Image (tube, rainbow, N blue to C red):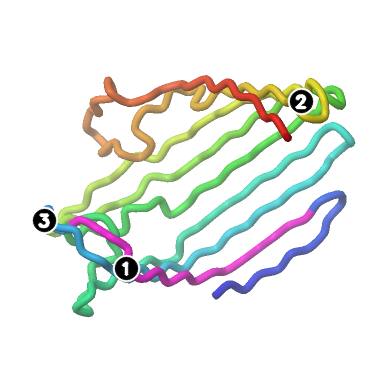
Amino acid sequence: MEIGINQGIHNGYIDVALYNIVQDKVPRRNNGAIQNVEVDQTGLEVEVFDQITDSVSVSASYMHILEVEATREDGTNANGNVFFGNNGVPVPEHQASLRLDYRATEKWGVWGAAYYTTGFESYNIDGSVTERSGFTRLDIGTSYAVNDKLTLRARAENLLDERDFGQTIDGQTFDDDAKLGTVVWLGVDYTF
């Protein structure tokens, strides 16, 4: 179920939605075994877009999770945890993004995007609380339309070289040697 408002503003829109999603048979780990749970999530989403000029557009989004419940197949509560044990909600409460696009010419454009996610608390089986860190990510990209059929693309993701994306436990070091940092992508779009 989703209740929302979509309102045109300037050369864009604002979209606000309060949602409730129920997913059946979501797999999760429990003591090494995989079991299915029903996940009931309620949240608020806000999205804003504006074409500021003919060549500049901006978009922003925000998401706030109000409640998450996970129920095992036998009807018992898994304390909102979709992933393992009896831990609490393992998702950030707040997430936000901002993207700016600039079309320099009809053929060439650049963009930049920022993502921010708060940390969160996980409640462990023994009742203790584990604090997880939030993160910020910055990406940039460009595209060039060679002709009506061929477009070249490049982007660099994670310019801040974030390695854990919310997996760090506050106050502890994180082994990030095997984690990807900044990544550069090159691509070609061809329409037949």
Q: CA distance from mark 1 to mark 3?
A: 18 Å
- Residue at 46% of width from left, 68% of height from top? 42
Q: CA distance from mark 2 to mark 1?
A: 43 Å
Q: Which residue is label 3 attached to?
A: 31
Secondary structure beneath label 2: strand
User: Residue 132, located in which quarter of the rendered image?
Assistant: top left
Secondary structure beneath label 3: loop
Q: Residues within 10 Å of mark 1 (few under 14, many from 20)?
A: few
> On the rendered structure, is 60 left or right of 93?
right
Upstream in sequence: badge 2 or badge 1 = 1
Image location (x, y in percent) of residue 96? 55, 46
- Please say if 125 is above or below 130: below
Seen from the viewer's position, the closer of residues 180 and 80 is: 180
- Please say if 110 is above or below 79: above
Upstream in sequence: badge 3 or badge 2 = 3
Q: CA distance from mark 3 to mark 2?
A: 49 Å
- Residue at 38% of width from left, 45% of height from top? 119
Q: Which residue is label 1 attached to?
A: 25
Type of the residue with mark 3:
Asn
- Disc 2 + disc 1, Cβ < 8 Å: no
Seen from the viewer's position, the closer of residues 64 and 73 is: 73
Type of the residue with mark 1:
Lys
Q: Which residue is label 2 attached to?
A: 109
- Residue at 79% of width from left, 46% of height from top? 50
Which quadrant would the N terminus be assigned to in this image?
A: bottom right
Q: Within the magenta stretch, is there residue 22?
A: yes
- Residue at 66% of width from left, 63% of height from top? 16
Type of the residue with mark 2:
Gly
Which quadrant would the C terminus be assigned to in this image?
A: top right
Q: Residues within 10 Å of mark 3 (few under 14, many from 20)?
A: few
Secondary structure beneath label 1: strand
User: Residue 155, located in which quarter of the rendered image?
Assistant: top right
